Amino acid sequence: MPLVDSYGHVTTVRSGVLVPANGSKWVELIGYNTWNKKNYIELGEDYLHPACFAGTCKSGKQFMEFLSTHVKAADIPHISPPKAGIPTTSGPLTKQNAFLLLEWIRELQRKGISIPKKFLTCIQQGSWLKIKINDSPGYRPPSESFLLASDGGNSNWGTILQTGTVFVDIP
């Protein structure tokens, strides 16, 4: 199916399709399309607007649902991570983006998708997690920030995010 990308180019050959940047989770967390090297296209914003085809009118939401079903247009956490690092993890993340990142990792684990080394390293070593040591707030990598308790054996967050054993409070 031919699609128009965010630059106005029509494409029929692609590895994957990202939902339009406007209002997407991937742009909030990452800031730009790091998947373009893997031949993923970002849909243009026109797909978000209502349109009429052959006398049938559809809202932008209905059209995006169609594209999600038929061309697998996706957003975080339902896409594979890039093989690159995420620059936003080098500094503080909003609470919403921190939970989105953790949800993304959980979804990858659930699907059995391996996490690329560069991506995982930037998450483990980036100072994005808000912590408090002796009532002094700051930001540290999760690998230096906490030890996660087991949830009955169903989670291995600790083995993914933590490589150290420094204990601090997380607000």
Image (cartoon, grey):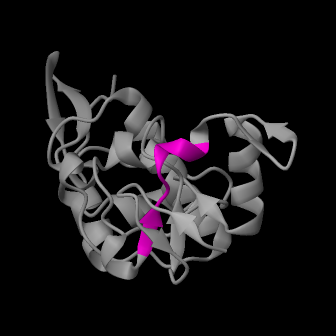
Residue 169 placed where, x, y %?
Answer: 29, 28
The span shown in magenta is 40-47
Residue drawn 53% across the image and 73% down it: 16
Q: Is residue 127 magenta?
A: no
Residue drawn 48% across the image and 48% down it: 20
Residue drawn 15% across the image and 21% down it: 137
| 32 with respect to 81 (left or right) | left
Quarter placement of the N terminus: bottom right
**Closest to the observer, 59 or 137:** 59
| 91 over 131 or under it: above or below | below
**Res. 74 in view:** yes
Residue drawn 85% across the image and 50% down it: 54
Residue closest to the far front: 54
**Res. 148 in view:** no
| 124 over 52 or under it: above or below | below
Residue 86 placed where, x, y %?
Answer: 25, 58
